[in-house]
Image: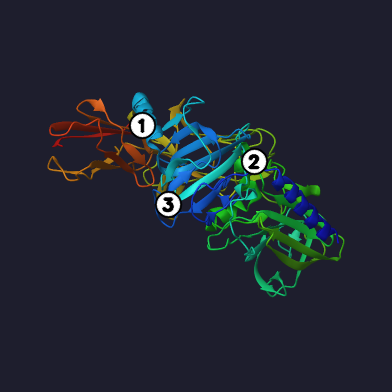
Amino acid sequence: MREINLFLLVFFIQINVFSQLPEFTAPVDFPIVLNGNFGELRTNHFHAGIDIKTNGETGLPVYAIDDGYISRIAVSPSGYGKAIYIDHPNGYTSVYAHLDGFTDTVAKWVKKEQYRLKSYQVNLYPEKKQFEFNKGDLIAHSGNSGSSAGPHLHFEIRNTSNQNPVNPQNFNFGIEDQTNPVAENLFIYPLSDSSHVENSIKKKYYKLVFYDGAYHIKGKPTIDGFGKLGFGIDAIDHIDGNWSKCGIYQMEYWVDNQLVNAFQIDQLQYSKMRDINSHIDYEAAIKRNEKYHKTFIEPGNKLEIYKQTWNRGIFNFNDGKRHTVKIVFFDINMNSAKVEFTLRSTKPVNHPELKTAAFFHYNEENKFSDDEIDVTLPSNALYNDLHFIYKKGKTPPGAFSSLHRVHRPFTPLDKAIDIAVKPVNLPEELNDKALLAYFDIKEGTYSAIGGEFTDGKVVSKTMTFGDICIVTDTISPKIDVLSFKNNQLMEPNRIRFKIEDELSGIDKYNVYIDGGWILFSYDMKRDMLEYVFDEHIEKGKTHQLKIEVKDNKNNRSSYETSFYY
């Protein structure tokens, strides 16, 4: 009865809240089908909006959902790409991202500002009355810009006062969904030194099967365990008309008839987005790109999505009895599914003491030093207390330091940590080319962290633990010339280059024609620079072109040519 009452309470609260929301028109003029929803689990963040399918097309009209004015325009080679932010009188801001382009008036102003700033990437804040729209006015066209993995419209609704995103599916945009969420797998976690699952202190994985209206542990109707335990479930939602793995809206964790924890995703805070790495099983996400919602809340997790919680979702199975565990999950239309199984409380098991380099408290500054490395974690960089692992290894091929195992990459960080590594046999003339990098032992490859040579060590900040060493970047960026051959322009209406850097990454690029700076768009996911001929280039004459590219270690490349247009 208590479970039914809670469900009804949530349902009636939703009705009350929804009845007070403004009536927005849809941002597109075709039926909305989603391939991504609000609160969906993404890398280092929850999805802050909805992704509207455009059936692989770009250039579809995008409309203002209500009266308002453009408060911000952003253009970036990554992230949201081309995006418009419209403030509405009712206290909400709508966001339209990964656009192909803006309306003519807006596009002309943006281009003018890009030339003034000599930068493709801009963050612009027009005057309040500069670009006003009525509900249903055309504001842009859908695209595939920024880090978009394919053509679609990313759409958000935010509270204007704090810019925190709210769930667009709480507004009536006519999104059909009668499909229940699903789950395939379950983790059980021992959460104290005396806890265990089937006599193991390590988390245990179980396959789920569906029968009798619920998901159950395959072949294991009863699990033996003891002490403080937590659970993780890979619950996902499929929305009508699409089999993309979308996120669930609400989850409840019950032991017998007691609600132990629940979350509901109606609003998110950008300042706490990274705490998703505590909410999920971070190791499963990194290793296998699998996203598990945890039923328990780590002490450093600051998310405000948890609506009903007892003891931060940690239940102590220490009474020698059998308990019914139930995890119920819902989409925003209250389509639901549940996982049920029995956990039998047994006796504690003695486990060998962990031998690690240090013990870190999550809410304190922590430091570790060895002969060749210093590691500093600011307070609250961790989500939980940590048995810190460190090991020094041999110098990898081409590196200029020992290989330092700085804990494990499967433990998430909420803040950047400081690492200083002492070089080994680093030539003095390469000091300014030195940087820290992760080394993949299996693949034998490096990925840049960054850093500078300071006081005899290479120093950098990083957001990830891992195997770290010093390398140097002395190789200039690569410029692939796509539009010219033997000083002949091979494309009738555009110029394209592909720019890549082997290690430290592209820092800056500039293109000049006849000595004047020219606006080239930059698509980072394709490493592509592109210019479509416009009023800045005079027709019927020979022009001189020069491109300059610099990486983050000041290695430079250039290319010059003349061409007739």
Tell me the number on the disc at residue 151.
3
Q: Which amino acid does label 3 sit on?
A: Pro
Q: Nearer the viewer, mark 2 or mark 1?
A: 1
Specify whether 524 is left or right of 315: left
Would you call the spot at circle 2 few (<14 residues within 10 Å), some (14-19), or many (20 or more)? many
Q: Which label sits on residue 108?
A: 1
Q: Position of residue 204 (x, y in %)?
A: 67, 63
- Which element carries disc 1, helix, strand or loop? helix
Q: Quadrant of residue 304?
A: top right
What SS does tag 3 mark? loop
Residue 353, given in percent of the width and then of the height, sits at: 71, 52
- The answer to whether residue 315 of the structure is visible from this angle is no
Left or right: 95 as drawn, with respect to 524: right
Apparent side of residue 102 relative to residue 71 in the rendered image (left or right): left
Q: In this view, does 439 lie above or below 558?
A: below
Residue 23 to residue 376: above or below: below
Asked if the residue under mark 1 is in contact with the one under mark 2, i.e. CB atoms within 8 Å, the reply is no
Q: Which quadrant is home to the N terminus?
A: bottom right
Disc 3 crowd rating (10 Å Cα; few below 14, some 14-19, many 20+) is: many
The dot on residue 382 is 2
Q: Earlier in the sequence, mark 2 or mark 1?
A: 1
The residue type indicated by label 1 comes to Lys
Which labelled disc corresponds to residue 509? none
How far apart are labels 2 and 3 at the CA level? 37 Å
Label 2, secondary structure: give it.
loop
3D distance between C-alphas at marks 2 and 1: 46 Å
Give the residue at x 62% y 38%. 164
